[in-house]
Amino acid sequence: MKTGQQGFTLVELIVVIVILGLLAATAIPRFINVSNSARAASVKGLSGGLASTVAVVQAAFAAAGGVSGTTTSVSMADGTSVPVTGYGIPTATATTGGIFVGLGSNALTGFTTSGGATATGTVTFTPSGGSATCQVVYSGLNGNVTPTTTGC
């Protein structure tokens, strides 16, 4: 009487291990690229939020009859006072108010900020884990928001 096979042969086990190794070798680079894509997406998202904030503050400045050179802050609907430079551009101060109004308390989680020493200076936002070229730069001088996603 003949008994059935009770397990896998060594050759079958090695073939399965090789196939799993090949699958892992092709999948790992894709997962590494996902983190780079996530940083680039967060830079683009913050850039859009900052640009929207600038537009809303400038609209509130115009609606309130703000005059360049004499109006130094704009009152938002929630009572927040946003310091502005000429033409209702939010200041680049790295403090409460300024360009940060309207972004929400968690908008800058995972970002480091630098600059903003003067109202018309620049503030640079860099995501954690990104290179120095992966950033969003806000200019308090003209309200420009410039995202750079190379090196994310």
Image (cartoon, rainbow, N blue to C red):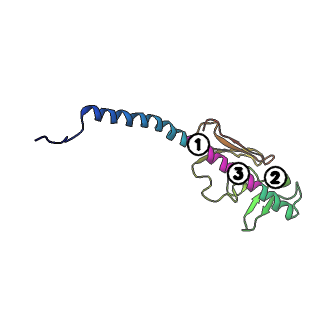
Q: Please state the extent of the stretch shown in magenta in the rendering.
A: 35-54
Is 45 left or right of 56, judged from the image as shown? left
Q: Which residue is mark 3?
A: 48
On whether residue 4 falls in the magenta region, the answer is no
Q: Which percent across, then down, holds residue 77? A: 75, 68
Q: Nearer the viewer, residue 148 or 41?
A: 41
Q: Pick whichever of labels 1 and 2 is earlier in the sequence.
A: 1
Q: Which percent across, then down, holds residue 92? A: 73, 49
Q: Badge 2: how crowded within 10 Å, few (<14), some, or many (20+)?
A: many
Q: Pick whichever of labels 1 and 3 is earlier in the sequence.
A: 1
Q: Which residue is mark 1?
A: 37
Q: Quadrant of residue 105?
A: bottom right
Q: Secondary structure at mark 3?
A: helix
Disc 1 to disc 2, how far (Cα)?
35 Å
From this view, report whether residue 21 is shown above or below residue 58: above
Disc 2 to disc 3, how far (Cα)?
21 Å
| Disc number placed over residue 85 in the picture, else none | 2
